Image (spheres, grey):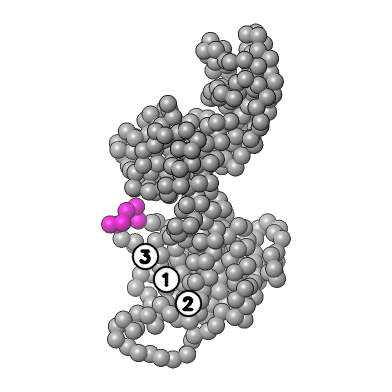
Amino acid sequence: MTKIVLFENIHPSASEVFNSAGFTDIKTFPSALVGDELLNEVKDATVIGIRSRTQLEEKVLEHAQAARVVGCFCIGTNQVDLDYAMQKGVPVFNAPFSNTRSVAELVIAEAILLLRRIPEKNMRVHAGFWDKTAQGAFEARGKTLGIIGYGNIGSQVGTLAESMGMSVSFYDVEAKLPLGNAKSCASLAQLLADSDVVTLHVPGGAETENIINERTLAQMKKGAIVINASRGTVVDINALDAALESGHISGAALDVFPVEPKSVEEPLDSPLKGKDNVILTPHIGGSTQESQENIGREVAEKIVSYLQNGATKSAVNFPEISYLPSTGTQRIIHVHKNVPGTMAGLSNVLAEHGFNISGQQLQTRSEFGYAMTDVDKPITEPVLKALRALPGTLRCETLPL
């Protein structure tokens, strides 16, 4: 029986996909679990679905002995020990595209609000002051938006910005084809110097840590705006705070932070709190009903495809094999260490037991390999046992065709 556990209020669209595919043993939780509660719920789960708060570190994955696949119903996968999951033969899927529009719209909205000094005006009116003035308030039209990281989200931000009459420049470490009239900058320094609004859309990690810092902030135009809806580690918060205090940076919007609260009750610890020219949001860039519905469906469909036919296309930690039509009676999926002789051993076991291979595909990724093999008759338990006993085998399962 396939048991599915979904944490953190994953959209019902995911359960709809699972039910339609015949997977009905689904248990849902409105929030993340920790400690023994989490261990107890994952111990016999075939599928584990999470968002950003549930931490699937090695201890948890080791406890989840029945787990065959993990779904991150979000973009990021930092909350999962991807290497250990691979060692257990467990692919991890995410949704890198489904909330693109939601994040892009938030960024554009924040740029307009900060250019017009709306956060400050809003707070002043609430406090009883009627400061009706155009001083320091600007239209978005004619301003230059600088995008750091021109991927799926960054490029869509640029498209929306152009539709409002903004000029768009971008900087990316990889060569990217510009959309519309966007222009690629040869250096980060050039982009910073030319931009009225700078928005970040880069991955986390050592290469992007604190790329917005005291030095790069000084390279920006006086009065520029900084927006970060990517990863909390890419902005040096103290340096940004100092630049805001000095007036060199006129406003900022942050949806992500170096250390984020783990619950609704835990407050955010940041020197930026209370500033009337700063918008702080609780990591909600992709939190719209539309995006959550799309994410639920996208990740669930990937999981179902893996459970039913072994496809691992777009898995973040696994050798990728696309969906292949059946060419036999039963399919074997074999996850193994990428060492010489593994495939020969698999073929020999099948030949010794009188099986004919009707279709096969192999993909490797670093030190791991993933083989999908179709055979002409049902696999018996002794054969499956022999396949699992092959040296280097991490996981071996059979799928009906």
Q: Is residue 129 magenta?
A: no
Three-letter amino acid code of the residue under disc 1: Ile
Q: Which quarter of the picture shows residue 183? A: bottom right
Earlier-in-chain disc, 2 versus 1: 2
Whether residue 264 appears in magenta in the rendering, the answer is yes
The type of residue carrying mark 3 is Ser
- Residue indicated by mark 2: 114
Element class at badge 1: strand
Q: Earlier in the sequence, mark 2 or mark 3?
A: 2
The magenta span reads: 261-266
Place of residue 262 in the rendered image (x, y in percent of width and height, measured from the top left): 34, 52
Q: Position of residue 158 (x, y in %)?
A: 62, 67
From the image, state whether disc 1 or disc 3 is nearer to you. Answer: 1
Q: Give the spatial CA distance, label 2 vs label 1.
A: 8 Å
> In terms of depth relative to the viewer, which is nearer, 323 or 342?
323
Q: Are marks 2 and 1 in contact (CB under 8 Å)?
A: yes
Residue 267: x and y in percent read 31, 60
